[in-house]
Amino acid sequence: MKTLSRKRHLLNSRLRTGVVAVEFAVVAPVFILFLLVSFEFARLNIMRHTADSAAYEAARHAMVPGATATEAIDKANNLLSVVGTNGATVTINPSTLGPGVDEIMVTINIPLDQNGWIAPKFTSGQSIQAQSRLKTERSQ
């Protein structure tokens, strides 16, 4: 009787091993997909926050007397390069900074097509955009 029960136990454990392998084969790809998507969204969120910060820092740099738009664009691009953005465009309005300028607006546009691992397949034509508008410190 004991040997019969032992054989059933061995047979059941082998069947369970097969069930576990099938369950793993079904669940693992879905879990890995969710894991990769969460990494992608975290990375894009970091990129969005960096774009906001870079726009603000570029505007702060451009608002002081003697600053140029080129220096502000370089400041923004340096901050964006920290997170590895590709194809970002930085626009300073007005493009020529002088004593008569009262307000500076910096706009940063980061295309998702060039900056995602998974997202380009789903976000074609989309972009991250950040703006910062500051009053200047120039005296007239």
Image (cartoon, rainbow, N blue to C red):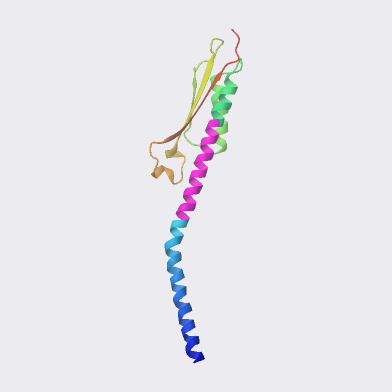
Residue 60 image offset from top left, x and y in percent: 59, 23
**Magenta-colored stretch includes residue 39:** yes
Can residue 31 be seen in this snapshot? yes
Would you say the magenta stretch is mainly helix, strand or loop? helix
Please state if 114 lies on the left or on the right of 64 as rendered.
Answer: left
User: Image point 49% across, 52% down: which residue?
Assistant: 35
Say which residue appears at 46% left-offset and 74% top-offset.
16
Quick check: 122 above or below 89? Answer: below
Residue shown at 51%/36% (left/top)?
48
- Comparing 30 with 83, the one in front is 30
Identify the magenta region: 32-52
Whether residue 84 is visible, yes or no, is no
Is residue 131 toward the left or the right of residue 122 in the image?
Answer: right
Q: Position of residue 101 (x, y in %)?
A: 53, 13
1 or 102, which lies in front?
1
The picture places residue 137, in percent across and down from the top left corner, at: 60, 15
Which image quarter holds the C terminus?
A: top right
Instruction: Out of 7 and 33, give the one closest to the viewer.
Output: 7
- Exactly how many numbered labels are in the figure? 0
Residue 58: in magenta span: no
